[in-house]
Image (cartoon, rainbow, N blue to C red):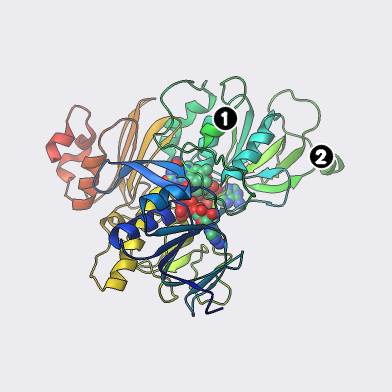
């Protein structure tokens, strides 16, 4: 085995944003090193057109590329399409499912996450993660009249906005929609969108671009995560009316076949005057039973470590991620991890926390490259500034959404004040304040306040004297604080 191993300075596993960013940055930092990227996918993801919005927040496009493009761009990089079947951290080797063995000096694991699916084996339950899962969804929605969406995070929110012409039953266990990202007030701001006609032909939902994998290949459960614009590839149906019914503060008690429902003799809750049988039913914890054509489980992710743990000694976080220190090192020597697969285990800065997002996959991929290179070349480096402040820019219901710092008062134990500016259908601005200092902010709409608020969170200026005037629309606070 020893003799067959091909030796590389750096090996990166995973062709998603974290892995590709890590590889590109290793190429820049160490242009003479031999770098290997092993990925289970035919196409790899890459970040382009980076546009800084603030010190810590960038907007960028995400594209899928052929591995050859990366190899042409970075001549010291080799990309191998294969699945890592086993990691032998003690002997610093990875073994692929096709039997290849690669030895490394430094290894970075960027294997992403898997959807955490309710009733994964039920044929009526689908999920969205990679190209293959979108294709399955596409095939099933073609004939559907009603679908049930479970979950209240990013995917569910995007689906209820994007899908028109089909009835949607949206089942959430929180009191308000999109609770992973926004507060009840912002949810009220968006709520009218659930029954509005969707505007067609307006500006694209997001600047970031994603194209469906057109390379025919063996289907794999290890496809990279989709990202913004994934829904542009869905052939959505017929009319452009949203028809969303919301069931709040409930969970799924059981998923039922039509025969089970008949046997139970239980009344079916109707959303309209429907007659006849549905392919699948759900019983909710409030006792209601609804039928639909199929169910989408948009219920979060779990880190994808399945092929990596056996025989190794990784410390694993309670969420299943590989625990990493402030150098993104795992507990195995010379093994780093970045992106969705890892969980930070350092003393976090007050205004930063992990969310498994594209933004953070890119930041971690870049920082992991720097840490690996610095360790080999004995350079001193400092924690990247991006881990000072949580930032996320996205779009929900067609509107720009920016989240900064403790935007939902995370970790403040309810001991904070909120400053709010609200204009129905136009903008929603919330600042989270403790003792007159800004801890976080949520901005919906074209507010142009992100840079100012970022500064105010980072410099912790005492803003008590301004009180509610801070959000007075007649005062130009950008000029005041710049
Ligand atoms: C539908 C959807 C929409 C999203 N929208 C947004 C959004 O709007 N904004 C945002 O910030 N984030 C969004 N995200 C989240 C974002 O896509 C992920 O956080 C990010 O892509 C994670 O990147 P990653 O590189 O860590 O993992 P992944 O993109 O999952 O990449 C993992 C890679 O590892 C490879 N791999 C796994 N195991 C092995 C193995 N054993 N051997 C070889 N290769 C392996 C996979 O093939 C893949 O290439 C979305 C996610 C989904 C699913
Ligand atoms: N625009 C963006 O930024 C987008 C980001 N993404 C990212 O992609 C990844 C996958 O998205 P998604 O799947 O939506 O994950 P999210 O983490 O965003 O949301 C998961 C949701 O599922 C709920 N949930 C979990 N388990 C259950 C259960 N058993 N029953 C009912 N509800 C449940 C959670 O509720 P609770 O909070 O109560 O646990 C939460 O509302 C995430 O990392 C997400 O951040 C995806 C799409 C868009």
Locate the C terminus by quadrant. top left
Residue 480 visible at all: yes
For residue 20, which quarter of the picture?
Answer: bottom left
Q: Please tell me whether residue 327 is drawn above or below residue 300 in the rendered image.
A: below
Q: Position of residue 428 (x, y in %)?
A: 34, 33
Q: Please tell me whether residue 113 is drawn above or below residue 464 in the rendered image.
A: below
In the rendered image, which residue does mark 1 sit on? 163
45 or 344, which is in the foreground?
A: 45
Q: Position of residue 467 (x, y in %)?
A: 20, 40
292 or 33, which is in the foreground?
A: 33
- Asked if labels 2 and 1 touch by Cβ distance under 8 angstroms, the answer is no
Q: Identify the residue shown where x is 74% and y is 40%.
A: 281
The disc placed on residue 258 is 2
Q: Please tell me whether residue 229 is drawn above or below residue 5 in the rendered image.
A: above
Single out the mark in the foreground, 1 or 2.
1
Q: Identify the residue shown where x is 61% and y is 64%.
A: 98
Q: Is disc 1 placed on a helix, strand or loop?
A: loop
* CA neighbours of label 1 inside 10 A, class few (<14), some (14 to 19), many (20+): many
Q: Position of residue 479 (x, y in %)?
A: 13, 35
Q: Is disc 2 placed on a helix, strand or loop?
A: helix
Would residue 95 appear left or right of 426 to someone viewing this image? Answer: right
Q: Is mark 2 within 8 Å of ligand 2?
A: no
* CA neighbours of label 2 inside 10 A, class few (<14), some (14 to 19), many (20+): some
């Amino acid at each position: 085995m020893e003799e067959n191993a091909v030796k590389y300075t750096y090996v990166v596993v995973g062709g998603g944003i974290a892995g590709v960013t890590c590889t590109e940055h290793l190429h820049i930092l160490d242009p003479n090193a031999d770098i290997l990227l092993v990925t289970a996918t035919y196409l790899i993801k890459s970040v382009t057109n980076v546009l800084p919005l603030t010190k810590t927040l960038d907007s960028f496009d995400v594209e899928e590329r052929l591995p050859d493009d990366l190899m042409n761009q970075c001549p010291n990089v080799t990309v191998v399409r294969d699945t890592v079947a086993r990691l032998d951290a003690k002997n610093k080797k990875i073994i692929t499912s096709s039997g290849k063995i690669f030895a490394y000096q430094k290894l970075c694991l960027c294997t992403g996450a898997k959807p955490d699916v309710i009733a994964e084996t039920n044929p009526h339950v689908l999920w969205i993660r990679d190209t293959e899962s979108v294709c399955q969804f596409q095939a099933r929605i073609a004939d559907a009249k009603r679908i049930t969406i479970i979950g209240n995070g990013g995917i569910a929110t995007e689906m209820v906005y994007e899908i028109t012409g089909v009835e949607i039953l949206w089942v959430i266990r929180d009191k308000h929609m999109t609770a992973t990202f926004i507060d009840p007030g912002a949810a009220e701001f968006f709520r009218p969108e659930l029954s509005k006609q969707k505007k067609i032909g307006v500006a694209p939902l997001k600047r970031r671009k994603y194209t469906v994998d057109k390379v025919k290949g063996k289907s794999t459960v290890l496809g990279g995560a989709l990202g913004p614009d994934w829904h542009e590839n869905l052939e959505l149906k017929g009319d452009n009316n949203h028809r969303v019914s919301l069931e709040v503060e409930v969970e799924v008690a059981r998923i039922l076949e039509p025969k089970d429902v008949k046997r139970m003799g239980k009344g079916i809750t109707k959303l309209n005057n429907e007659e006849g049988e549905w392919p699948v039913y759900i019983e909710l914890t409030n006792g209601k039973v609804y039928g639909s054509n199929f169910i989408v489980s948009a219920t979060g992710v779990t880190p994808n470590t399945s092929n990596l743990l056996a025989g190794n000694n990784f410390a694993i976080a309670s969420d299943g991620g590989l625990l990493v220190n402030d150098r993104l090192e795992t507990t195995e020597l010379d093994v780093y991890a970045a992106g969705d697969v890892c969980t930070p285990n350092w003393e976090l800065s007050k205004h930063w926390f992990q969310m498994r997002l594209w933004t953070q996959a890119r930041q971690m991929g870049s920082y992991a490259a720097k840490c690996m290179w610095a360790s080999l070349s004995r350079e001193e480096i400092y924690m990247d500034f991006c881990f000072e402040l949580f930032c996320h820019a996205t779009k929900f219901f067609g509107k720009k959404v920016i989240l900064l710092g403790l935007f939902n008062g995370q970790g403040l134990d309810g001991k904070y004040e909120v400053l709010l500016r609200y204009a129905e259908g136009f903008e929603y601005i919330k600042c989270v304040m403790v003792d007159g200092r800004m801890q976080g902010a949520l901005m919906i709409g074209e507010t142009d306040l992100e840079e100012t608020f970022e500064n105010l969170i980072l410099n912790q200026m005492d803003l008590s004297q301004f009180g509610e005037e801070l959000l007075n629309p007649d005062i130009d606070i950008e000029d005041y604080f710049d």
